[in-house]
Amino acid sequence: MLEKDYQLSAYKKLAAAGGMKTPGAITSARNSANTAKLLAEELTGLILDTIVYPDTITSYVSTIRTTTTGLTNIGELATKHADLLAGYADLSMLLQLDIGWDVYCRANEREVSELPISIAIGDVTITKSLEDAVNALNTSSLVAAMREINQTLNTGSGSSSGSGSGGGTATPPPALTEEQIESLKVATEQFGVVFNQTTAPTTALQQQ
């Protein structure tokens, strides 16, 4: 089958890029997608539709929602990238594409370069960077802060108290303590700092 030097060269190059097994770029992209999806689901569960959050924490709740959307987008991007690579991660197909690309470049007097899809399949750096960035996200402080807040806000419903017709007074909704607000503030900010580390590898993956 591999009668010509350029065919043998293509075979060696594509095999090294992962054509003989599941490439690392696909594995790490899928890992990133799965982790991002789980984190997004966890954060989504922290914000309850049954609770009207007070103004003192609405900005933090909004940040959690924005971060959740970001994680969902990362998961979708990583999944699409893995699916794209998997569609071409067959040595026979890659070999045919590489030879066809070589012929195209020569026929159009262009410098022969490596097939872009084989570059992506062989490049685990970007997907691994994204995987590491997503794995670095720790939701424990954020979960603890929001669960305590949700528990506090769920304890009161503004029901009336007192006896007799028309003699009841509305029970004020439960108030959050300064400590609870500060805990959520710190947890949100700390999570945001780590989450920002996903920006560079996400952008790099979009541009690959």
Image (cartoon, helix red, strand yellow):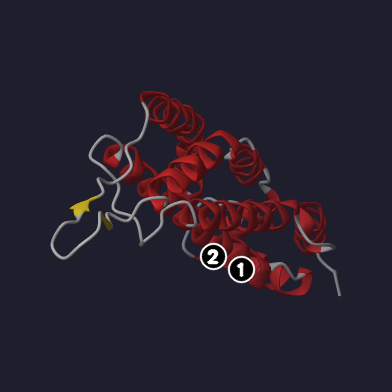
Q: Is residue 22 above or below residue 47?
A: below
Q: Nearer the viewer, residue 5 or 71?
A: 71
Residue 9: percent from left, percent from top: 79, 56
Going by the numbered disc 2, the residue's amino acid type is: Lys
Q: Is residue 128 above or below residue 80?
A: above
Relative to 27, 202 lies left or right = left
In the orientation shown, which residue stands out farthest toward the front? 164
CA–CA distance in space, label 1 to label 2: 5 Å
Relative to 87, 74 lies left or right = left
Among the 4 quarters of the image, the one containing residue 81: bottom right
Residue 33: percent from left, percent from top: 60, 57
* Numbered circle sitting on residue 184: none
**Residue where numbered disc 1 is placed:** 83
Q: Are marks 1 and 2 in contact (CB under 8 Å)?
A: yes
Q: Secondary structure at mark 2?
A: helix
* Residue at 65%, 41% in the rendered image: 135
**Residue where numbered disc 2 is placed:** 80
Going by the numbered disc 1, the residue's amino acid type is: Asp
Q: Nearer the viewer, residue 4 or 13?
A: 13
Residue 176: percent from left, percent from top: 35, 35
* Residue at 36%, 61% in the rendered image: 50
* Residue at 28%, 42% in the rendered image: 58
Among the 4 quarters of the image, the one containing residue 181: top left
Q: Nearer the viewer, residue 33 or 92?
A: 33
Residue 158: percent from left, percent from top: 27, 54
Relative to 178, 134 lies left or right = right
* Residue at 69%, 58% in the rendered image: 26
Q: Secondary structure at mark 1?
A: helix
Q: Nearer the viewer, residue 164 or 196?
A: 164
Among the 4 quarters of the image, the one containing residue 88: bottom right
In the orientation shown, which residue stands out farthest toward the left? 166
Label 2: how many Cα within 10 Å (few below 14, some 14–19, many 20+): some
